[in-house]
């Protein structure tokens, strides 16, 4: 089954998505990632105010099958976390691009988002992984 891809988001090779909303960047895991992990049972999120560099681990998602680190799309400061995921991690399975967002970031440099794959490049990468 083909994964849904948010055309307005940018993507990391590790299957996180990032999208500009106002002066912040919202981030979560892609539909492909949640489908591969299946039923999520636990989400670990960072503290608001924590700062990370692009590529650093900011959290963990766990399913009954596996645990996966979640990586920062850009360098910046965490401005909000989706605390709903602590009691309802399956929200990511149902709606990874909207209700299942994980963090909001105040980026050090918003242009860093341009370094990530656009939806077409991410879709191509998924096709190559399946081949």
Image (cartoon, rainbow, N blue to C red):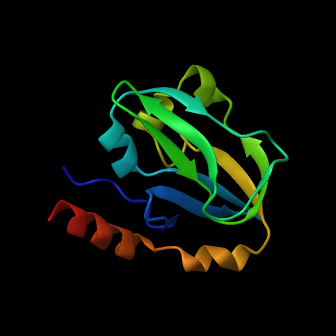
In the image, what residue occupies the spot 51% across and 58% down? 17
Side of 16 relative to 127 (left or right): right
Give residue 46's position: percent from left, percent from top.
Answer: 71, 40
Give residue 34's position: percent from left, percent from top.
Answer: 39, 42
Quick check: 129 above or below 85?
Answer: below
Q: What is the quadrant of residue 6 in the picture?
A: bottom left
Q: Nearer the viewer, residue 62 or 27?
A: 62
* Quadrant in the picture for the C terminus: bottom left
In the image, what residue occupies the spot 78% across and 39% down? 47
Q: Nearer the viewer, residue 128 or 83?
A: 128
Which residue is situated farthest in the right direction here? Answer: 49
In the image, what residue occupies the spot 38% across and 47% down? 33
Q: What is the quadrant of residue 110 in the picture?
A: bottom right
Give residue 109's position: percent from left, percent from top.
Answer: 76, 75
Q: What is the quadrant of residue 107 in the picture?
A: bottom right
Side of 119 relative to 35 (left or right): right
Side of 26 relative to 41 (left or right): right
């Amino acid at each position: 089954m083909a994964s849904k891809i948010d055309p307005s988001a940018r993507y990391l090779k590790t299957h996180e998505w990032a999208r500009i909303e106002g002066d912040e960047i919202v981030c979560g895991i892609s539909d492909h990632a949640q489908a591969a992990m299946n039923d999520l049972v636990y989400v670990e999120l960072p503290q608001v105010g924590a700062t990370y560099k692009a590529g650093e681990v900011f959290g963990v998602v766990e399913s009954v099958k596996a645990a996966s680190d979640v990586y920062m799309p850009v360098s910046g400061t965490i401005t909000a976390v989706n605390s709903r995921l602590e009691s309802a991690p399956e929200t990511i399975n149902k709606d990874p691009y909207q209700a299942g967002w994980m963090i909001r970031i105040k980026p050090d440099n918003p242009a860093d988002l341009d370094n990530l794959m656009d939806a077409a490049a991410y879709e191509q990468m998924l096709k190559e992984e399946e081949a």
